[in-house]
Image (spheres, rainbow, N blue to C red):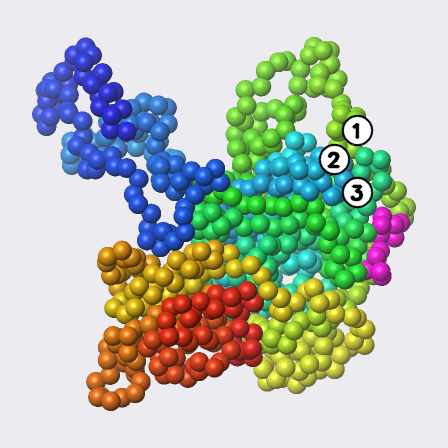
Amino acid sequence: VRAVADAIAGAVHDGPAVAEGPEEGVPGKPGPVSPPVAEPTKPVGPLPPKADQSGPETVSPTGQPTGAEQARVAQSGAYLTTAQGTRVHDSDHSLKAGPRGPVLLQDHHLREKLMHFDHERIPERVVHARGSAAHGVFRSYGTAQGVTKAAFLGPDVETPVFVRFSTVLGSRGSADTVRDTRGFATKFYTEEGVFDLVGNNIPVFFIQDAIKFPDVIHAGKPHPDREIPQAQSAHDTFWDFVSLHTEATHHTLWNMSDRGIPRSYRMMEGFGVHTFRLVNAEGVTTLVKFHWKPKLGVHSLVWEEAQIIAGVDPDFHRRDLFDAIEAGAFPQWELGIQTFPDTDDQMFEGIDLLDSTKIVPEELAPVQPLGLLTLNKNPSNFFAEVEQVAFHTGHLVPGIDATDDPLLAGRNFSYLDTQISRLGGPNFPQLPINRTHAPVNDMQRDGMHQTAVHRGAAPYKPNSLDGGCPFFAGADAGAFIEVPVEVPAGRKVREAPASYSDHYSQARLFWLSMSPVEREHIIAAYTFELGKCYEQAVKERTLAVLANVDGELCAQVAAGLGLPVPDPSEPLADVSPSPALSQVGRTWPLDGRVIGIVTDGAGDLAGVADLREAVLDAGMVPLVVAPTGGVLGGGDSPVTVQRTFATARSVEFDALVFAGSPAAGADAYGARDAKAGHPRPVTTDPRVLALLIEAYRHGKALAGWGGARALFEAVGVSADDSGVVVADDSQGVRPVMELLAAHRVWERFPSGV
Ligand code: HDD
């Protein structure tokens, strides 16, 4: 940059002499042109990555180092210019009539700079305002060809994608780990046009008909008078609505389960929710439900962890996604479908496929894999990409069509409509992130923010002036042709089919599918949320709803609220559990798990370095925690500190290892006990004790060597407890890594958190 600047500066100085301007400080008197303003900084190379990002190698999908040059350098030239390209002489002082005089209206640069700044924000999304996203690629296995002619689902076809994850209720700046549904929206830039799969991490929805959407969102959003609470369902209006509107019961139960507080976006399932209609090359149709299955498994936080993170690191999920991709630990999901015959009644095993409050258990219709999604590139500019991306359920490609689900129909109107106010007009498909990768040859013209310079005189059809172009395509030329399905004839009514009045059977199915620990969490969540309500009638009505789901669930929540247990108002549904719905009881890959290695800074540093390498080799992220920052030790294996006792909190680690400290013995991790002969390190730094106690309570794997045994005993953790590994050296604690395959030490529950 400096070389270019010097070259350009030289060229200017070598040019013809400039006319003399007024002398500085003397009004009206001609003087020399004032010299360029002295720059306070010199151009520098990219800064080194921050310590906390220096874990695994930082690479881009193409193997290039990232983060530095591309991401940090915002400018493309040596000189600052206005938006019109005119070079700027001074951007720090307004143009004034003398140093203490009034600012002059003729200062175009000031006007332009402030005008642009004043308009930097656009309206946030009315729902799903808080989110983050990544680029990636979807590679199809070709297994879906029998049921769809969609070209991007052909064998080995690779399609670029952009995926945005989100919470629903909170504002743009709200915390990531609140209890809520998560959005999982995927834009496939296929050769046949854009296909958007705008799903959630929960397979059912609160309402069966889109006309209720404003109601459920008004109830869930903060109270309109005081605008609290932010990003929460734990308040009267939400529970008022869902207790009166009982078709929401199934979705609400999912929200109160561990699914409402995911550990990471990388560890969430995704669902298209509605039933879609696929059509193959022969015109044969199949009804399907879309599923995203994460390679890392489906994992959640525990509620206390989620609450602490909301304060300690509100960007937890955003950071996790970004860091994983920067580190080359690219998250992956398999896309799959459940298939159902396209029968006249659109029912499967007694389940109404057009009712978005219902699932079809995987035991009845297995999820068949179609392809693999890999997220491998972070956005370069959050606003341009993550804020401006516009998803729409109506963006379909040949081979994939909508069904008559009334929730989907309303969405097909709403997503286009909302972009008009959010992105300021009808030309949002021209924004770079929204541009299709297929050739566009439409007849849309003009409008706000038009960036295309269209040519020709005949943007209409039919025409003869452009030779009749463009022509319509038939199915052979890849046109999107709506599947000509029969529409049931009938009267025009505002009614729902009888099957839509079953509001409890699948809520019960979900409850019965949960393991004991997951049920404990659901009871705790209902008790917490209703405990935050003020209206007695709302609490009582919710208990009446729960009585129709399960007696034990209702009784436990009632006990927590100190209220009587109501009788069910209808017989409990006779349903079988779906084991696939439980998150507990399996093992999963360890990639990207975070292991904190806590050292007192003076102990077995060689052991710390050795363990760090072992964690990296296992594809996980080691973070060294020490009393202060900097580099510990020296020689061949210095250890860089990533977290200090002041900045570390247990919630960002999946496991904690307390490094041995032979020198300090039992008094490691803090000042020694003043009382000679005291057996325990009672003066251990309280922040270290908090790390240990929280991690234990949240069911995290723990390990330690050397003086760590005494530290564990000091807080009542025994070396014989489940999920605790105590050894003599850093080699001996390595089995702690394998414990992470089960996500948590489930034996420690129920724990009351
Ligand atoms: Fe919606 C955004 C998912 C029902 C109206 N929705 C939005 C996003 C996701 C979903 C993931 C965020 C997209 C992004 O990242 O930009 N919505 C769902 C699912 C639903 C659902 C899975 C039920 C199955 N939504 C739904 C209904 C309506 C809307 C019934 C209205 C009738 N949704 C919107 C919206 C949003 C939106 C207001 C806000 C911003 C946007 O669309 O672009 O139009």
**Taking 360 as reference, is 735 above or below it?**
below
Residue 619 image position (x, y, % from top left): 47, 55
The number of numbered discs placed on residues in the rendered structure image is 3
Task: Give how far across and how far down residue 110 sits, in percent.
Answer: 30, 32
Q: Are marks 1 and 2 in contact (CB under 8 Å)?
A: yes
Q: Amino acid at mark 2?
A: Pro
Q: Position of residue 134 (x, y in %)?
A: 52, 45
Alpha-carbon neighbours of circle 1 within 10 Å: few (<14), some, or many (≥20)? few
**How many neighbours does mark 2 have within 10 angstroms: few (below 14), some (14-19), or many (20 or more)?**
many
Circles 1 and 3: CB atoms closer than 8 Å: no
Q: Residue at x 67, y 41 (%)?
A: 140
Q: Is residue 83 above or below residue 351?
A: above
Mark nearer the N terminus (3 vs 2): 3
Identify the residue at horizontal 37%, vertical 24% (top origin).
84
Magenta-drawn segment: 341-351
**Residue occupied by mark 3:** 147
Please, what is the dominant secondary structure of the magenta stretch? Answer: loop
Q: Amino acid at mark 1?
A: Ala
- How far is disc 1 from disc 2 in space, using C-alphas? 9 Å
Tell me, for residue 398, which label it has, or none.
Answer: 2
Name the disc covering residue 475, or none.
Answer: 1
Residue found 58% across the figure and 50% down from its top: 332
| Label 3 crowd (10 A; few <14 / some 14-19 / many >=20) | many
Asked if one can make out residue 350 in the rendered structure from this viewpoint, the answer is yes
